[in-house]
Image: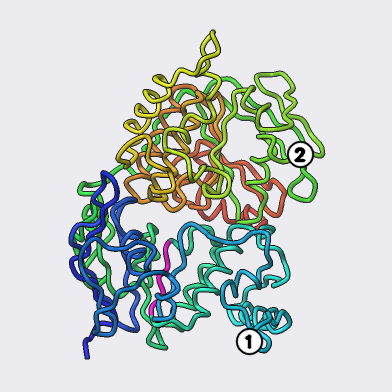
Amino acid sequence: MSEYILEMIDVSKNFPGVHALKNVSFRLRPGTVHALMGENGAGKSTLMKCLIGLYQMNGGKVLLRGEEVHIKDPAEATKRGISMIHQELSTVNERSVAENLFLGRPPLKAGLFVDHKAMYKQAEELLAEFSMPIDPYEKMGNLTVAKMQMVEIAKAVSYNSDIVIMDEPTSALTTKEVEQLFGIIASLKAKGVAIIYISHKMEEIFRISDEITVFRDGMMVGTGAAGDFDIHSLIKMMVGRNLDEMYPKIDCEIGEVVMRVEHLSAGNAFSDVSFDLRRGEILGFAGLVGAGRTELLETLFGLRRKTDGKIYIKGREAQIRNPADATRYGLAMLTEDRRRTGIIPVSSVKDNIIVANLKAYVTKLRFINKRRMQRDAEEYIGKLNIKTSGADVRVQDLSGGNQQKVLVARWLLTNPEILFVDEPTRGIDVGAKAEIHSLITQMANDGKAIIMVSSEMPEVLGMCDRVLVMHEGKMTGILSREEATQERIMQYATNVAVS
């Protein structure tokens, strides 16, 4: 018997114009957490998709429990004891939580009809087992991204697989939910389950991993026990260089007020929020998940209707009823969930970049300037170092981090006066984070005003000039860069009395 439950040997995978995996080998022991690390596009998720049959390998072999296997699709992978929590959620939003949990495998009556009573009972028991306070009858689309992620985690674990792949499982989770997940992982390890864990959060990797394998440019560049690595050596191995400036904040000239918000409310989402935003400033919105930060941004951008209060742009009251109004006032917004509210998956990288700026390509004779579209798309692909073989590649074929860069390019191209960015580096590797942070800082230096929502405290502290903190829909304080510390922000975020 092999000491490994899984061996992937000399795996290669090609896409048009891209050699995604180059003779990669990977081995997994039972009862361990093995972390896969690397920049977006390094090949981590591609290797896992080859394993579960979403992609077919161009070369190499897979040994499962010592025997060579050929997995043709995810259904076969599940039968062989392999399940995966995907980075990009693939939920059926119009169906219930229970229906999503048992998609493709509902309990049946007489082997023919779906036993709905049994399905909802089993769903309720499964959610309770993982301490998830989620109604199995709730429509999936009504859940927050964090709760959707928890449902997907419960679903993957419920297959009783020998191997569970977790691709960025904590990207949308609260601290409490992360602790729940780590408890689940510990119980799985105790049962001998092997876990492949993909994350860009270094503190998680060093906390739960037994082994680490590092990818770069489609190749495996290092593997070993987690204790053999430290943060600096791991980052250098991932990106091929030292990253001394993760948060390249520069002192920008803070100018006049460009936006003033007075007593803004939106139903039960949040109420009585007031602040101003200045040219050259990065204003952070901090708080726990559910505090109302995203809802506040959505209201400012016209995605959500305000029920009270006023918004002023450059001293004049603005009537923002929808995103089209917002863009006319010089606003742009990078949304929290790139899959649901960001990218157009089946369209090209070029079309995704230029879609918010279409009017700029209409000539006086009402023709479309396709040459300029192509030029602008290629310019921003280069500026943001988007890893793609060309502007005409479908955006859904890019890694999650490169999809995020495409969305950043989309809004930079509109040359906004005010930019809202909601979790701009969620699910993005350290190298790409530094690049996006640098772009945001440069925009501020160019006189743009920026509001950033982030659940990552180092990002808030490292990037923002001031921090507006929210708790359960209420603004609890605004802190200057000098006043803002992790402890002080958490005091305001939990509404604990601040001395």
Which of 232 and 487 lies nearest the eye of the viewer? Answer: 232
The residues tagged by marks 2 and 1 sit, at their Cα atoms, a distance apart of 48 Å
Q: Which residues are magenta?
A: 163-167
Q: From what the image shows, is residue 22 above or below residue 81?
A: above
On the image, which quarter does residue 116 sit in? bottom right
- Amino acid found under the numbered disc labelled 2: Arg
Q: Residue at x 47, y 45 (%)?
A: 461
Scheme by which the image is coloured:
rainbow
Q: From what the image shows, is residue 425 above or below residue 312?
A: below
Looking at the image, residue 318 sits to the left or right of residue 391; the answer is right
- Amino acid found under the numbered disc labelled 1: Gly
Q: Give how far across and how far down residue 491 sits, in percent.
A: 60, 56
Which label number is shown at residue 305?
Answer: 2
Residue 93 is a magenta residue: no
Residue 496 visible to the viewer: no
Q: Quadrant of the N terminus?
A: bottom left
Closest to the camera, between mark 2 and mark 1, is 1
Residue 269 visible to the viewer: yes
